[in-house]
Image: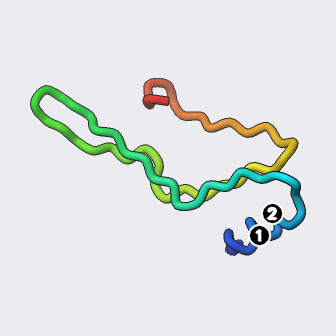
Amino acid sequence: MVDVAVEMKEILLAEKFALIFKNVNYEIIEEKGKEKNKKKILDNINAYCQSSELTAIMGPSGSYN
């Protein structure tokens, strides 16, 4: 298993620019009639984007994206 913190540090040292996400969570509240439910969209996401790379965050159709 790769140590994410070490890998991110190496990227920051090697690149002029990097965009890093750590421990990102996102929830929505779905309303169905009188009932309200929380729906987790992102659950503890870690990611990085290096300079000169094309990056897209995509989801299935109808997923509130």
In the picture, residue 6 is in which quadrant? bottom right
Q: Nearer the viewer, residue 61 or 9?
A: 9
Say whether residue 20 is left or right of residue 43: right
Q: Number of labelled discs?
A: 2
Callout 2: SS: helix
Residue 34 percent location from the top left of the image: 10, 31
Taking the spot 43% from the left edge, 47% from the top edge, the residue there is 26
Q: CA distance from mark 2 to mark 1?
A: 5 Å
Say whether residue 30 is left or right of residue 41: left
Q: Which residue is mark 2?
A: 12
Q: Residue furthest front?
A: 16
Q: Which residue is mark 1?
A: 9
- The residue type indicated by label 2 comes to Leu
Label disc, if present, on residue 18 of the rendered structure: none
Callout 1: SS: helix
Say whether residue 21 is left or right of residue 9: left
- In this view, 48 is above or below 37: below
Taking the spot 43% from the left edge, 44% from the top edge, the residue there is 41
Q: Nearer the viewer, residue 6 or 1?
A: 6
Taking the spot 52% from the left edge, 60% from the top edge, the residue there is 23
Residue 29 percent location from the top left of the image: 28, 38
